[in-house]
Image (spheres, rainbow, N blue to C red):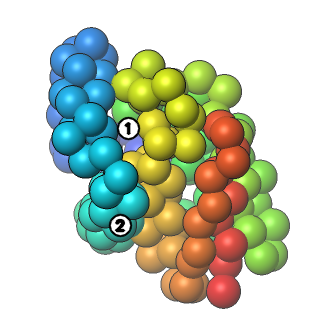
């Protein structure tokens, strides 16, 4: 699976300097202000698109059965930092250990909204289930319906 993920990132990914991404993201958060929930909703759609783009590289059943490793490895290989994922029958818990996204806003709950949305869309699409997301500090909980 790791080889297929590497191929996906090589073919579909874009490499940008972290400081550049942090600055743009920080400005977007300042501009969005109280509308940061819209960023989460937009990111959810992006997560669905990412899962669909991954499909030619990793089958849906392979992705679902390796969801923990897939999400952790993708996050790390894409340069977003370090997370720990726990997958249960009714939820996926993501503990963000380290991410440059946290430098974009003083409140982790705000800084992680786009990541939470993207993860929700990605995981929901792979699992074929409805999702609902909560962010508590650096913990993202995606409830599976």
Which residue is disc 1 drawn over? Answer: 6
User: What is the x, y in percent for residue 139?
Assistant: 69, 44
- Taking the spot 81% from the left edge, 67% from the top edge, the residue there is 88
Contact, mark 1 vs mark 2 (Cβ under 8 Å):
no
Quadrant of residue 137 within the rendered picture? top right
Tell us which disc is closer to us: 1 or 2.
Answer: 2
Query: Where does the C terminus fall, quadrant-wise?
Result: bottom right
Which residue is disc 2 drawn over? Answer: 41
Q: From where the camera sits, is residue 10 visible?
A: no
In the depicted structure, whether residue 79 falls above or below residue 38: above
User: Mark 2 falls on what kind of element?
Assistant: helix
In the depicted structure, whether residue 58 falls above or below residue 110: below
Q: From where the camera sits, is residue 72 visible?
A: yes
User: What is the x, y in percent for residue 98?
Assistant: 59, 23
Packing grade of label 1 (10 A; few <14, some 14-19, many >=20) is some
Instruction: Tell me which numbered mark, 1 or 2, is placed earlier along the sequence.
Output: 1
- For residue 19, which numbered disc appears in the image? none
- Taking the spot 38% from the left edge, 25% from the top edge, the residue there is 104
Frontmost residue, 59 versus 138 = 138
- Taking the spot 25% from the left edge, 47% from the top edge, the residue there is 32
In the depicted structure, whether residue 117 falls above or below residue 89: above
In the depicted structure, whether residue 3 falls above or below residue 141: above
User: What is the x, y in percent for residue 78?
Assistant: 38, 32
Q: How many marks?
A: 2
Frontmost residue, 95 versus 107 = 107
Frontmost residue, 72 versus 5 = 72
Question: Relative to 6, is 84 on the left or the right?
Answer: right
User: What is the x, y in percent for residue 107?
Assistant: 54, 32
- Find the distance from the CA under tag 1 to the CA under tag 2: 27 Å
Question: Relative to 51, is 107 on the left or the right?
Answer: right
Packing grade of label 2 (10 A; few <14, some 14-19, many >=20) is some
User: Mark 1 falls on what kind of element?
Assistant: helix
């Amino acid at each position: 699976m790791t080889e297929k993920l590497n191929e996906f990132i090589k073919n579909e990914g874009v490499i940008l300097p972290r400081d550049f991404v942090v600055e743009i993201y920080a400005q977007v958060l300042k501009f969005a202000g109280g509308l940061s929930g819209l960023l989460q909703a937009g990111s959810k759609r992006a997560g669905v698109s990412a899962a669909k783009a991954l499909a030619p590289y990793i089958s849906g059943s392979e992705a679902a059965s390796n969801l923990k490793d897939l999400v952790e490895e993708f996050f790390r290989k894409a340069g977003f930092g370090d997370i720990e994922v726990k997958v249960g029958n009714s939820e996926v818990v993501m503990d963000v250990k380290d991410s440059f996204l946290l430098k974009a806003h003083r409140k982790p709950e705000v800084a992680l909204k786009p990541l939470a949305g993207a993860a929700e869309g990605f995981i929901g699409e792979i699992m074929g289930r409805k999702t609902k997301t909560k962010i508590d500090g650096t913990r993202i909980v995606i409830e599976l319906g």
